[in-house]
Amino acid sequence: MPEEDKTQPTRREAFIKLGVGSVAAACAGAGVFGYSYLSPNVLYEPSPIANAGKPERYPRGSVTQDLQAGIYVIHGPEGFYALSATCTHLGCLTAWNAEQGIIACPCHGSKFSQQGAKLEGPAPRGLPWLKVWLSDEGELLVDRATVIPQKQYLRT
Amino acid sequence: MTIQDLRDSRVWRSVFRGGSGATNLRRSLAIQQNVFLHLASVKARKHALEFNVTWYLGTLSFGTFLILVVTGILLMLYYHPSVPQAYADMKDLQFVVSAGVFLRNLHRWSAHTMVMLVFAHMFKVFYRGAYRKPREFNWVIGVILLIVTLLLSYTGYLLPWDQLAYWAITVGSNIMSAVPVLGQKIRFLMLGGNTVNANALLRFYVLHCVILPLAAFLLVAVHFWRIRKDGGLYTGHAGQKESK
């Protein structure tokens, strides 16, 4: 009977390693598979581009909220601009308060100016300015996914 | 025919194998050989069963959980987790379905009560020092059960699909996204999208009705079993003296 080689793994140890290795590989595969299954590839969410209609709808000095799109279309003295109406704190829908001339969040009391600047917390930032342009049909389009620097007005 | 005859009958004995009789052995077997009761100890210190020791907070938490399971299953029979049908179903349960408003309110109030009782149970265990060796692991199970309770509460909050539900989950899921690095991913997977929408409603429904209750049942089983394994309910020094 040949002497056992202590440095070589026994058949049993080799099989245990193989078994543990395959279970680990299967678990890793299940993790990857599970993650990709849980991330939807197609979303039936509204397009980020919202149609705000003809500019004539908005008299100079008006602040108009589109509740469906979650944006403000504002016709200021310098021209048109659009703000996101989603509070930068925790995502509640803010509302325009015409009497005080501010945008206020009903959830935790953040306040913003008509230009979107933060007046009062707990919001960490002001409301982002969104890209606005005129379509070929002469309608205002707002891209809710594209944030632009402040004070970029659209003149019609 | 007496009850004793019934308990000695062949049918009864085929179900309850321990046999009847008022001996300690028979009573122990009745607990030990029952799939539901065997998690519990066959003996308890008399002192441990007094109101003052536990205020029965753990049992009461479990009781509200059972009420929630029963009323929840009944509510599922009228509820479709789809947009905007969910809201209409919730209103139907309130105004159209016989006893619907009773079941919905019972589910709602039991949910609030369960959260309160679980916290109270935890405080009682903490202030009596019942979490200490050898019961540390059962305390950990208890903490996980608290989290499961809160998650059940949170996922159930979205299901009425009203304004309160919608904005509460919007706020809650934005809090989730504050997790460093993975925050946005976690939120996306949780909601099944970028906003609280049909996917989010369905995911919360599955979590609320299947995954979390199953987790709760399993953990509760371990929690009860560990009471026996860790030497029965903690009675404190006074109790241990009395039981001698």
Image (cartoon, helix red, strand yellow):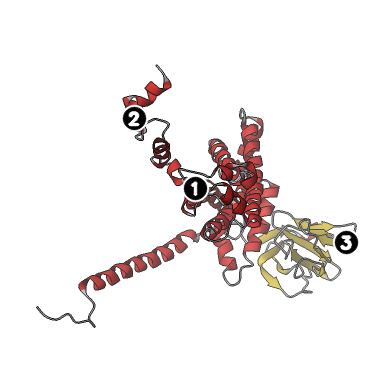
Closer to viewer: mark 3 or mark 1: 1
In the rendered structure, the answer to whether residue A140 lies left or right of residue B69 reads right
**Location of mark 3 (residue):** A101
Helix, strand or loop under label 1: helix
**Location of mark 1 (residue):** B217
Q: Amino acid at mark 3?
A: Gly
Residue shown at the point (41%, 37%) measured from the top left: B30
A65 or B146: which is nearer to us? B146
Label 2 Cα crowd, 10 Å radius (few <14 / some 14-19 / many 20+): some
Does mark 1 fall on the same chain as mark 2?
A: yes
Q: CA distance from mark 2 to mark 1?
A: 29 Å
**Residue B60 placement (x, y as % from top left):** 60, 42
Q: Amino acid at mark 1?
A: Phe
Label 1: chain? B
B94 or B24: which is nearer to us? B24
Residue A58 seen by the camera: no
**Residue B35 placement (x, y as % from top left):** 41, 41
- Is residue A41 positioned above or below B107 on the image? below
Q: Amino acid at mark 2?
A: Arg
Label 3: chain? A
Label 2: chain? B
Label 1 Cα crowd, 10 Å radius (few <14 / some 14-19 / many 20+): some
Q: Quadrant of residue A4?
A: bottom left
Residue A142 seen by the camera: yes
Which of the two labelled residues, at mark 2 and mark 1, occupies the earlier sequence position?
A: 2
B234 or A48: which is nearer to us? B234
Helix, strand or loop under label 2: helix
Residue shown at the point (77%, 62%) measured from the top left: A73
